[in-house]
Structures are given as structure tokens and as C-alpha cells.
Image (cartoon, rainbow, N blue to C red):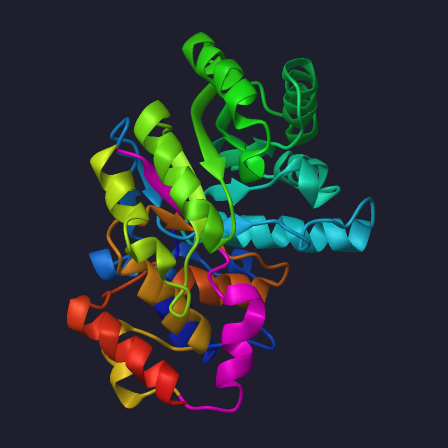
Amino acid sequence: MNYSRRALLKRYGLAGLGLAAAPSLFSLSSSSASVKSKEDTMGQRVIASSGEKLPMVGLGTWQTFDVGNSQAELEQRKQVLAEMYKLGGTVIDSSPMYGSSKAVVGRVTAQLESQSKFFYATKVWTSGRQAGIDQMNASFKKMQRNTMDLMQIHNLVDWETHVKTLRAWKEEGKIRYWGLTHYVDSAHRTLESIIKSDQPDFVQFNYSIRSRNAEKSLFETCQKNKTAVLINQPYDSGNLFRKVKGKALPDWATAYGIESWGQYFLKFILSNTNVTCVIPGTSKVKHLIDNMGAGYGALPDANGREKMAAYLERL
């Protein structure tokens, strides 16, 4: 069941990032958090190449899931993923670059009844055809998947080689979608060129309220070529939180259901309709609940987006 985040936070008085003692959603009965309207369910966006829908907020695992074999840390990540699913999120993004993150995802999801309901995304991050095949097969094993939902070429490393493998694997049904990733503005032109020539199902790149280079033409290229968009670096590597530390949200933010600065930043991103899913990383349940909240309720229109950006710049 997708629990109502609004009902959860109101009942326990846990609005925003002050969720110091956020309870597990397992402790709530379905009757205490029933879904009563569209505003109480996670918003979804369409994957243009297939028509399948994805929840708008997912989870990145860079650093946050690289915890090895620590049982306490594994249990905490298990709780994060359990809560994410209960709040309507399914997308989990990882990579060989992320240390033990893939294995951690595989171990903890294997303990959840929702294991088969997640959308698993990982990457190939090496050069050479066979090295790429070996690395990707290792990812299947670590994440305990027979089929990977999305395999991406990480930071375009040897992309011309790997795209051939990914196309073949999609035809064989080993992966459902393939894509490309990068995390800096200087790569956007290259991403556009590959999208136009090879039409990947997905592209993942950086975008935030203060890092808007993708608005110049990358989003339009994705839209024209039916390429779904995952957003990384939504908080600009934490710089956004440093900028607003100790600052109050504007009163008008409540019109969009914004209860924290994190939701302010994520709702700005999601108000761009070309964004399919944003994947902030966290290892804390209280932050996960807050992040998921950005996928609920109203989103800013074009005027609202610029109002949000202007307010931030004045701080």
C-alpha cells in the first residue's frame, strides 16, 4: 500500500527535516493513513519509449549505500527501501563506482516482500566489450536480478562499445531499458548528440534550481527523441542546503505542499515536465520520507518555478 505522506506527517507532527524521531511506516495501520485523493499518492511520469509509468521520486545510492557487511547499517538501508516503497517510490539507482552499494541493494531488497516491485537501475563503468559484459553480469549477481530494469553507460565511458551490447541485451530481454549518464554541464552537448543518433530509453544528468544548463536544449532533445530523464545532483552536492541554512521558507511555498527546503528543491525539478524521476540519495529514514513528499501534491507552474529560483537567489 502507498501510505499517505501527508496523513503520516500531520498525525505525528513530523513536517520537514525536523523528523528526528520519525516512526517506521510499519507501525501504522492502513486505516490510519488511507489514500483519499490523487494528492495523497505519489505522482508518476511516463517512460516515453514504452508508455510504462514510474514514480517521480526514487533513490540514488552513491556513498549512502556503500556500507559493506555491517548488520546495523544494512538494517538501516533495508528500512529506507521499505519506507520508500510504502510511500510509492520504486526507482533504485546504483553503479560499480559506488563500492558495495549494488551488493547492499541486493541483500536488503531480498529481505523485503516488495523485492520484485522495485525498478532496478545500474551502470557499466569500464572500457572494453568483454570487461563491460563481465562487469554487468557481476551487477546482476550482486543485485540478485535475472533481468535488470535499466542498464546505463556511466559517464559515457567507452559508450560506443557498450551501446552495442546493451542494444543486444534489450532485444534478448536481459535488460528492459538502456541509457547514458553524466553529472557535469560540459557533457550535455555530447549527451544530446548521442540521444539524437542512438535514441536511448533513458538519460541521467545533473539539474537543480541553481544548475539549469540542461534547460538550454538538453531537455528539448530528450523530449523530441522520447528519452526518459533521471536527475542526479538535485541538491548540487549539498551546496543548496548550505545556502539556505538558517533561512525560512517563503510563506507561499505551502501552496505547493512544500514543508522543507529539500522539497522546495525537488519540487522545482519535478515541475519540469520533461523530468521522469529525480533520485536524491539518503541513508536516513527521516530524509527519505521528506524526499518522497516532493512527489505528492501540487507542482509549480512556469511562473512559480521562476518565483522559486528568484527567492533563492535573494537569500
Task: Name which residue lies at 31% across and 61% down.
Answer: 296
**Residue placed furthest toward the top:** 172
Please tell me whether residue 173 is drawn above or below residue 204 in the rendered image: above
Percent of width and height locating residue 127: 66, 25
Task: Name which residue lies at 41% across and 58% down.
Answer: 207
Does residue 27 appear left or right of residue 41 in this picture? right
Please tell me whether residue 216 is drawn above or below residue 114 in the rendered image: below
| 49 or 208, nearer to the observer | 208
> Is residue 147 in view from this perspective?
no
Does residue 303 appear left or right of residue 144 in this picture? left
Is 236 magenta? The answer is yes
Percent of width and height locating residue 172: 46, 8
> Is residue 6 in view from this perspective?
yes
Residues drawn in magenta: 226-248
Is 173 magenta? The answer is no
Please tell me whether residue 77 is drawn above or below residue 266 in the rendered image: above
Location of the C terminus (image quadrant): bottom left
Percent of width and height locating residue 300: 22, 68
Task: Name which residue lies at 57% across and 18% down.
Answer: 146
Does residue 61 appear left or right of residue 313 in this picture? right
Please tell me whether residue 124 is drawn above or below residue 184 in the rendered image: above
| 24 or 174, nearer to the observer | 174
Using the rendered view, name the quadrant where residue 110 is placed: top right
Q: How many marks do you count on the picture? A: 0
Percent of width and height locating residue 250: 32, 88
